[in-house]
Image (cartoon, helix red, strand yellow):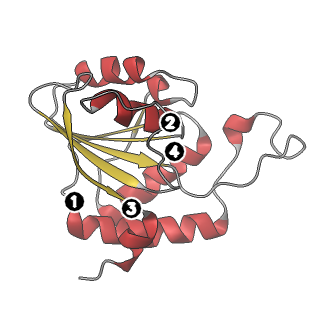
Amino acid sequence: MDLLIVRHAIAAEPNPKRWPDDRQRPLTAEGSLRARRAAAGLKHIAEPPALLLTSPLVRARQTAAILSECAGWPEALECAALAPEASAEAVLKALQARPHERIAVVGHQPCLGRLIAHCLPGALHPQAIELKRFGVAWLAFEGIARPEGAVLRWLLAPGVLRAVRR
């Protein structure tokens, strides 16, 4: 199984007056624009997944929608296991329940960094891997997604994706 891991794009700063529920905090206009450019670059270097899962938070859902529109990825399905407080184990369990060869997820830091560390062999510290906003990692598994069962194919910063030209 191939797993593409995407951190949500640049979101508005937390503001309890504007968004009493932080789960409703959206992407900024600049974040949306940069994500569109990065998604266009990603379209040229990564095959679309068969399934796209997203955190239920607004900023992640908006990022997933940009991937669908600009990179030709499928429409996203919400997955509670991708919420910021979720564990790597919960994400793996959600992935194992889906028989797809290529899955992409959109979520949050530090959850995604912990997921990557959990999937790679060796004793990586859970904070060892940090994805920038709209950073993308590609993990390849033999068979199902499992702890320490992946090979890191690449981890790209959004600036690299925006620089990709056809």
The residue where tag 3 is placed is 69
The residue where tag 2 is placed is 127
Residue depicted at x 70% and y 45% = 25
Residue 155 % position (x, y): 33, 54
Sequence-wise, the earlier of marks 1 and 4 is 1
Sequence-wise, the earlier of marks 1 and 2 is 1
Q: Residues within 10 Å of mark 4 (few under 14, many from 20)?
A: many
Residue 157 % position (x, y): 42, 62
Q: Nearer the viewer, residue 104 or 69?
A: 104
Q: In terms of image quadrants, where is residue 147? A: top left
Badge 3 amino acid: Glu
| Alpha carbon separation for disc pair 3 and 1 | 15 Å
* Label placed on residue 46: 1
* Label placed on residue 61: 4
Residue 133 % position (x, y): 53, 55
| Alpha carbon separation for disc pair 4 and 3 | 12 Å
| Alpha carbon separation for disc pair 2 and 3 | 31 Å
| Helix, strand or loop under label 4 | helix
Q: Are marks 4 and 3 in contact (CB under 8 Å)?
A: no
Q: Residues within 10 Å of mark 1 (few under 14, many from 20)?
A: few
Sequence-wise, the earlier of marks 2 and 3 is 3
